[in-house]
Amino acid sequence: MAFHYRAETVLPRTSDLEEKLVAHFEARKFRLVHSADGLWEFRRGHKMATIYRFDIRAYATTLQVRSEPSEAGKALVRFHYDVFTLLTVPIREDVVRLEADIADFISACSPLGNDQRDRLAALPLASRFLPLWVWLVIVFALLFATVCFFWIFGSD
């Protein structure tokens, strides 16, 4: 099961946009796996993290970034996150964590993006995803309660 998140922004088109993009996301533990003209694909995390981690940034994530010429001197940059979540359900704070990667990149490329850091600074460190092991504990507890109920109140 995957969680998809998409965002786009318009940035000033500069000659070092690709260098800034790659350096920014590599600093956030992404690794560049594919690069073409105007397309970069990054990956980070691993699938097993959904079992024992509460941070969406540890989950297996594929990020595709596309850059297309826009208005004069501008570039339309699109971000597509594909996060492997197994049985976890993302909440708003997890989406904000993904937005934080983008907001920091915008801040690095444009002085207009600095106001987004204030709302991201107040977030707690732990995500509120429910990892797989929590779901398994809940299911087994309900199963145990059902068996006990029928054992105690069952017909003879």
Image: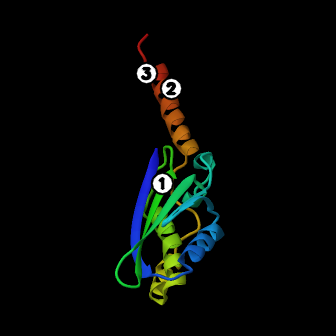
Judged left or right of residue 128, residue 58 is right
Image height of 113 relative to 99, above or below: below
Between residue 9 and residue 91, name the one nearer to us. 9
What residue does disc 2 label? 148
Category of crowding for the residue at label 3, using alpha-carbon neighbours closer than 10 angstroms: few (below 14), some (14–19), many (at least 20): few
Quarter of the picture containing the C terminus is top left
Between residue 18 and residue 1, name the one nearer to us. 18
Q: Cα distance, mark 1 to mark 3?
A: 48 Å
Residue 82 is marked as 1
Q: Cα distance, mark 2 to mark 3?
A: 8 Å
Tell me where residue 18 sits by quadrant: bottom right
Amino acid, disc 1: Asp
Between residue 3 and residue 94, name the one nearer to us. 3
Percent across and percent down for residue 43 are 59, 57
Mark 3 lies on a secondary structure that is: helix
Category of crowding for the residue at label 2, using alpha-carbon neighbours closer than 10 angstroms: few (below 14), some (14–19), many (at least 20): few
Amino acid, disc 2: Cys
Percent across and percent down for residue 96 are 46, 68
Residue 153 is marked as 3
Image height of 131 relative to 154, above or below: below
Q: Cα distance, mark 1 to mark 2?
A: 42 Å
